[in-house]
């Protein structure tokens, strides 16, 4: 039986406005849920392109299913819409905290991600048919103006999606964090849905339906409120599950989450967005292998470090007394401040951030090279101490265009050294980096450093001493073609020949590899690896 037309509120115009306002709010909340799933999945699982594709495709499919299922509720559109909004508020509001819990205690959240995408998509898809039914009833009672209801409804829906899409990255995420912003969005969703039904159509509901709707919304709001109160305790427990009980510092900056672990004399570890960036047991071997060969191969009075906001690469550079100036470009000012002010991290980097020869610069490395970097060069050495190329956000920093920009700031005969990821674990990625550096017009020499501790890596490589844990570091050392650093007549005849020639040519230039390091000759198939570009990235987790 179809619900009777509701009794008038103050006016049909105000009723129509109320429905459209709720459409606006629901659309904004729905997009926040969607972006929350994408952001958290990218952080916990890795490869933001894949996670966004999974979330969007599953949700769009589920929205179609929800629209079909909503046809069964059109006869009871008001109470059906109210209960659907209560369910959506509960599922969407709790989605982030449940995803984080599955990651922290069960080691993965892929299945939970698909389940939440499916459930939220079905509930969002059921909204529009029911809202269309409700607004048509209000419009029909007003003046028979049913012809413009579809346009009004979709206009409110799209504008709400715009507001939600902008509010998430610029307001909710930086101010409240991922968990609290999802819970707050759920509360707004529940209030908006319940208010619409009870204010505009409440008189037409049976007492049983009214109490069911009130009870459902009250229960949802209570659950969301209690969960919000316990968010801090939950985050601490989840961090202990992920990082162990040695968390010293946990900071959420505008750029990333920074966690320092290691108490009471234990090695200091640094995690950025859940990924192990610095292992206190072996970081000195990594940074010596990264910096030493590049500086030993020639003049190094002016050095540029891209990334390395922890100050550890700068420590190795500043150990050379003939280094006159170091420019360090780091995107996260919070990491720079921590590296300067945290007693243990500052001691580990030998207070490099306070050395008068070092000038820290806050900015994206790619953008800085395109702008200020063009005017501040040339540099004798450029050290690229950036996150792993397998992380989607870093792909542009391992592109041919990026290395072309780095080449422009190199002095004649200057060197560029790139951390290119583990060789044994991801050889295709490593040799793609080498191919990409060569494509930028630089001559290259590949080498690896062994002795890496079996590490814990959250995110896409979460493992502890497993076969997936990286056990080496791979580097690509490159030079801008010039008489130096190659001896006269020793420069390779064609790009890539220096890799196949082994260490002989670079040894003539004075390159000395640290103990435990090995020059690499690429396998025969590596020559076929095309370079990675901005429009055709070739790295994957």
Image (tube, grey):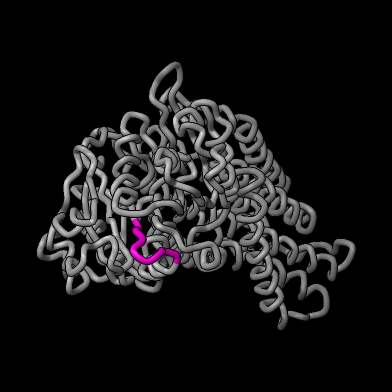
Asked if 359 appears above or below 442 in the picture, the reply is: above
Residue 454's quadrant in the figure?
top left
Start-end of magenta stretch: 409-416
Q: Is residue 51 visible?
A: no
**Residue 411 lies in the magenta stretch:** yes
Q: Residue furthest bottom?
A: 147
**Residue 298 lies in the magenta stretch:** no
Q: Residue furthest left?
A: 524
Q: Residue at x 18, y 48 (%)?
A: 424
Q: Residue at x 23, y 51 (%)?
A: 510
Q: Residue furthest right?
A: 10
The quadrant in which the C terminus is found is bottom left
Left-right relation of 66 to 404 = right
Q: Main secondary structure of the magenta part?
A: strand
Task: Where is residue 500? Give x, y as percent.
Answer: 13, 63
Q: Nearer the viewer, residue 429 or 380?
A: 380
């Amino acid at each position: 039986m179809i619900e009777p037309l509701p009794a008038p509120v103050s006016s049909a115009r105000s009723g129509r406005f109320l429905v459209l306002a709720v459409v606006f709010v629901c659309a904004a909340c729905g997009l926040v849920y969607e972006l929350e799933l994408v952001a958290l999945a990218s952080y916990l699982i890795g490869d933001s392109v894949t996670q966004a594709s999974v979330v969007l495709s599953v949700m769009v499919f589920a929205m179609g299913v929800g629209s079909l299922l909503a046809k069964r509720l059109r006869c009871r559109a008001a109470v059906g819409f109210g209960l659907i909004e209560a369910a959506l508020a509960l599922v969407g509001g709790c989605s982030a905290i449940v995803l984080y819990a599955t990651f922290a205690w069960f080691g993965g959240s892929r299945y939970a991600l698909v389940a939440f995408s499916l459930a939220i998509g079905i509930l969002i898809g059921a909204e529009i048919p029911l809202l269309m039914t409700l607004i048509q009833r209000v419009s029909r009672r007003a003046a028979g103006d049913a012809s413009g209801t579809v346009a009004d409804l979709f206009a409110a829906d799209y504008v709400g999606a715009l507001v939600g899409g902008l509010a998430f990255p610029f307001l909710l995420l930086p101010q409240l964090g991922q968990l609290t912003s999802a819970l707050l969005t759920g509360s707004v969703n529940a209030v908006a849905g319940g208010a619409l039904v009870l204010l505009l159509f409440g008189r037409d509901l049976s007492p049983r339906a009214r109490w069911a709707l009130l009870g459902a919304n009250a229960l949802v709001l209570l659950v969301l409120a209690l969960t919000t109160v316990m968010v801090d305790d939950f985050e601490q427990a989840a961090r202990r599950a992920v990082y162990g009980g040695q968390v010293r510092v946990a900071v959420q900056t505008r750029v990333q989450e920074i966690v320092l672990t290691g108490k009471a004399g234990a090695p200091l570890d640094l995690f950025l967005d859940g990924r192990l960036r610095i292992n206190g047991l072996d970081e000195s071997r990594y940074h010596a292998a990264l910096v030493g060969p590049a500086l030993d191969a020639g003049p190094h009075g002016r050095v540029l470090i891209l990334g390395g906001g922890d100050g550890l690469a700068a420590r190795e550079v500043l150990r050379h007394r003939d280094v006159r100036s170091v420019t360090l470009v780091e995107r996260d000012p919070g990491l720079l401040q921590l590296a300067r002010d945290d007693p243990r991290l500052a001691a580990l980097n030998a207070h490099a951030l306070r050395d008068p020869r070092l000038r820290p610069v806050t900015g994206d490395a790619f953008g800085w090279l395109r702008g200020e970097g063009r005017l501040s060069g040339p540099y004798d050495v450029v050290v690229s101490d950036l996150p792993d190329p397998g992380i989607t956000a870093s792909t542009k920093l391992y592109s041919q265009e990026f290395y072309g920009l780095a080449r422009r700031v190199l002095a004649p005969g200057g060197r560029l050294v790139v951390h290119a990821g583990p060789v044994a674990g991801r050889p295709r990625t490593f040799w793609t980096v080498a191919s990409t550096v060569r494509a930028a017009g630089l001559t290259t020499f590949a080498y690896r450093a062994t002795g890496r501790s079996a590490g814990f890596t959250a995110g896409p490589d979460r493992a502890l001493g497993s076969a997936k844990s990286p056990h080496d570091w791979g580097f690509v050392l490159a030079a801008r073609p010039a008489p130096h650093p190659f001896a006269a007549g020793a420069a390779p005849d064609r790009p890539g020949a220096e890799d196949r020639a082994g260490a002989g040519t670079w040894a003539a230039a004075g390159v000395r590899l640290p103990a435990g390091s090995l020059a690499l000759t690429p396998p025969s198939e590596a020559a076929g690896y095309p370079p990675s570009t901005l429009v055709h990235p070739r790295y994957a987790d």
